[in-house]
Image (cartoon, grey):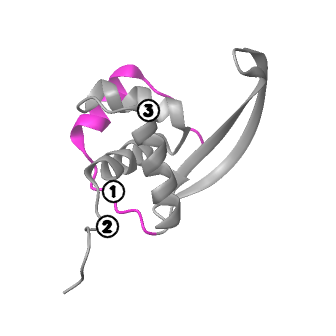
Amino acid sequence: MKKGRPVRSEIRQNIIEILHFIKKAYGYEIYKIYVAIFPKVTLRSIYYHLKKGLQLEEFQINKVEKEKGDYSWGGEAEKIYYALGANAKPTGNDRVKEYVESKQIQQRE
C-alpha cells in the first residue's frame, strides 16, 4: 500500500471535465466556467491544479499567447492555453456538458 496523500483530486478532475468539452482554454477562462458550475474555489487553487496536472500529464500546454493591453502589471499578459494530456480520464460530466451547451461556449481546436 502506498504512503502519503492520494494523487487524485476532485478539483483537478472537474478541470479535466471542463477541458473535455471545450478542448483548450487558459487558466482564468477555466476558473470562470468552474465557479459557475461547481462550488466556489480560488483562482490560485485552479492554477495550482493546472501546474500539478502538467506534472502528472493530465494536462498539456497547447500554446502560449502574449496579449498586449493596458494592465495594472504592465503592457502585456501571457495566456497559457491548456488541453487534456495523455493521463486525463474524463467521465463526461453532465453538469459541464449542459453548461457549455447552454452558454454556447466555442470549442477551440
User: What is the distance, in whole Å, between disc 3 and disc 2 at their CAs?
Assistant: 20 Å
User: What is the distance, in whole Å, between disc 1 and disc 3 at their CAs?
Assistant: 22 Å
Q: Nearer the viewer, mark 1 or mark 3?
A: 3
Q: Give the residue displayed 51% in from the left and 62% down from the top.
A: 85
**Quadrant of image for the N terminus:** bottom left
Looking at the image, tell me whether mark 1 or mark 3 is earlier in sequence order.
3
Q: Is residue 50 left or right of residue 100?
A: right
Q: Is residue 95 left or right of residue 56?
A: left
Displayed quadrant of residue 81:
top right
Looking at the image, tell me whether mark 2 or mark 1 is earlier in sequence order.
2
Q: Mark 3 belongs to which amino acid?
A: Leu
Residue on which disc 3 sits: 43
Residue 94 colored in magenta in the image: yes
- Depth check: give the residue in front, 105 or 8: 8
Q: Vertically, is 9 above or below 64?
A: below
Q: Is residue 41 left or right of residue 29?
A: left
Q: Give the residue displayed 30% in from the left and 37% down from the top.
A: 96
